[in-house]
Image: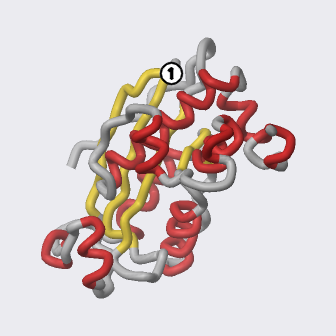
Amino acid sequence: MAHPIPAPASAVGVPDFIAIDVETANNDAGSICQIGFARFADGVLIDNWAWLINPQTWFSSHNIAIHGIRAADVTHAPSWDAVYHEIAALLAGRIVVSHTAFDVTATARACARYDLPLLGAQWLDSARVARRAFARFARRGWGLASLSAHLAIEFDHHDAGEDARAAGLVVLAAVEASGRSVVDWLTDAHRPLRDFA
């Protein structure tokens, strides 16, 4: 299967970043059955794709109802350890956006399952960014669906590629609304909410 080659980071404009999202087979966060990527350069989406992953475990009816992926869909898909080095190379040293910490936890648990190092990235939580950039979402409603509705982002929720794209667009909207850069948000996303009141 062909995979895109990461473009070099741009020296001007909005720093390049990659947004990711995962879907899981069951309530074990490490049971990744799909991973999506959205690559942004100079504030523009330049690539968006998703890979199915064979989690080598069972699928719950609850999770299937959310994302529609079944065990039969991943029979011939690679396992996490088979794609790990490609993913690690793609994300290495980059700013990587995820909506909430779930995707960070999921990738960490998948790595632990196969005794692989954690992915080396500069993680940026788009939910934390949105809670600080948009006052109406400070205390509630910062889910990807409600944020996307407010920001007029159209996407097919619970498809990993679509969710990754939406998370990246949320960050770009926050950059525009706040005047803070993506790099600024790496720090400011961890400041107390009261600092943004």
Residue 23 location, quadrant: bottom left
Would you place residue 179 above or below residue 113 in this image? above
Q: Quadrant of the C terminus?
A: top right
Asked if residue 124 shows in the view, the reply is: no
Q: Secondary structure at mark 1?
A: loop
Q: Position of residue 123 (x, y in %)?
A: 64, 49
Q: How is the image coloured?
A: secondary structure
* Image side of residue 170 versus residue 26, left or right: right
Residue in the picture at 33% in, 48% down: 161
**Closer to the camera in the image, 173 or 86:** 173
Residue in the picture at 25% in, 75% down: 64
Among all residues in the image, which is located at the extreme left?
Answer: 72
Q: Position of residue 26 (x, y in %)?
A: 37, 81
Q: Which residue has dot 1 on it? A: 43
Residue 9 location, quadrant: top right
**Closer to the camera in the image, 37 or 80:** 37
Would you place residue 77 above or below residue 182 in this image? below
Q: Position of residue 81 (x, y in %)?
A: 41, 69
Asked if residue 72 shows in the view, the reply is: yes
Among all residues in the image, which is located at the extreme top?
Answer: 12
Among all residues in the image, which is located at the extreme front?
Answer: 136
Q: Position of residue 179 (x, y in %)?
A: 70, 20
**Closer to the camera in the image, 60 or 115:** 60
* Image side of residue 84 versus residue 101, left or right: left
Residue in the picture at 61% in, 40% down: 95
Residue in the picture at 71% in, 41% down: 132
* Image side of residue 31 versus residue 51, left or right: right
Q: Amino acid at mark 1?
A: Gly
Number of marks in the rendered image: 1
